[in-house]
Amino acid sequence: MDTADLRIALVTGNYNYVLDGANRALNRLVEYLLRQGAAVRVYSPTVAQPAFEPQGDLVSVPSFSIPGRPEYRFPLALSPRVRRDLAQFAPNVLHVASPDVVSHRAVSWARRRGLPVLSSVHTRFETYLQYYNLAWFEPVMVAMLRRFYRRCDALVVPSESFAQVLREQRMNYDIDIWSRGVDRELFNPGRRSLEWRRTLGIADEEFVVGFHSRLVMEKGLDVFADTIDALRRRGVAHRVLIVGEGPARPWFEARLPQAVFTGFQGGAELGRAVASMDLLFFPSTTEAFGNVSLEAMACGLPVVAAIATGSQNLVDDGVSGRLIQPGAVHQFAEALRSYAADPALRARHGAAGELRSREFSWDQINQVVADT
């Protein structure tokens, strides 16, 4: 089927009300599909003041705020109003992007009509539980996810390492790679600004360890802070630059009182902030791809990351950065120390990462989903 013949109903738990890597990717996909002549209609929870304007037509589904994480919403039901809208739109493909109640109902709706169902998997949901003292529930969640994904005809995931995890978990056996791209207009070495650093009180010669992400515990904030403590005990001169916003910011600020927190940065300001770091340190183990690592690489920065899904497919250990065992604080600190001591090593690994980032074109990547 040609892309222009597609009529896609996209059901997702978050399309534009909170900014994250998954909904940025979904919006880029919809924008691409619309440019290719496809018809797309999106069904998602909505709020009065979303994080950004959505691509395409967005239909609100009933939802409620998640206790403890009120910035996120839980889709509640495929209401009669939404079902009527679906029927009127008459899709020939259903795309589900979150394994929630409404997506389950949408899959059932599509199955009764003989429609193919594609699921994009953006997050290792089961890994989040350890950060909220719920690790005991992980086997149950894996079973629930398996039931959902096996009802789909095919899955697309951001990286081969994540695909292999899903195969081992027996989630599905028709799995393709929908990678991620990087906007090189926003993220490139030319965005680096020593003048901007000076406005933050960071001297030109200071070594800046950067972190760029939504500030939530599942991004490895505890490991990041412990590593900075270990780096300080080694007597390594450095500054810490934290770019992002989120509910864990008060905890992170109290834990790292000497760090510079910029808050949310978007567009060209985000590109400038990332390029103005000297390296990115990102110890998260919950990423399916690692958008922030790719953005840092595009800015010519070496990346120190955990050996985990996503990062393994981006960072070439010893070539464009370092890959360290998850939670290995002293090994992380030693990797940071080596970059602090050797500007030539930083430049060499940063250049290798920038070259690798050129392989990630959004249009080529999004056509993969259209062809699946």
Image (cartoon, rainbow, N blue to C red):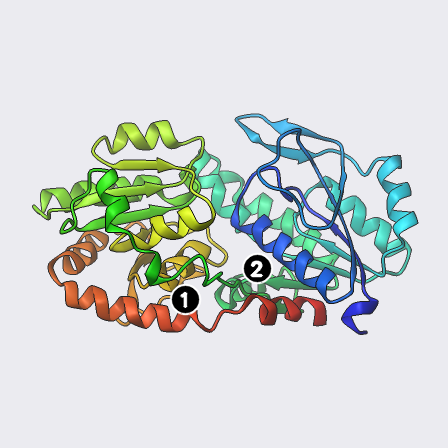
Q: Disc 2 marks which amino acid?
A: Gln
- Asked if the residue under mark 2 is in contact with the one under mark 1, i.e. CB atoms within 8 Å, the reply is no
Assign a secondary structure to mark 2. Answer: loop
Work out whether residue 232 or residue 31 is closer to the camera in this orientation and state it.
Answer: 31
Q: Name the residue under label 1.
A: 314
Q: Position of residue 281 (x, y in %)?
A: 30, 52
Work out whether residue 331 or residue 268 is closer to the camera in this orientation and state it.
Answer: 268
Q: Where is residue 332 in the image (x, y as percent from the top left)?
A: 23, 53
Seen from this angle, which residue lies furthest front?
195
Q: In which quarter of the image is residue 353?
A: bottom left
Q: Position of residue 248 (x, y in %)?
A: 40, 32
Q: Identify which residue is drawn at 44% across, 57% down.
A: 186
In this rendering, the count of numbered labels is 2
Query: How many C-alpha atoms fall within 10 Å of the one at disc 2: few (<14), some, or many (≥20)?
Result: few
The quadrant in which the N terminus is found is bottom right
* Foreground: disc 1 or disc 2: 1
Q: Can residue 224 be seen by looking at this rendering?
A: yes
Q: Can residue 177 be seen by looking at this rendering?
A: no
Q: Identify which residue is drawn at 40% across, 46% down.
A: 269
Q: Where is residue 329 in the image (x, y as percent from the top left)?
A: 23, 49
In the shown orientation, is residue 96 left or right of residue 305?
A: right
Seen from this angle, which residue lies furthest left?
235
Q: Identify which residue is drawn at 38% across, 31% down.
A: 249
Q: Distance between the residues labelled 1 and 2?
A: 23 Å
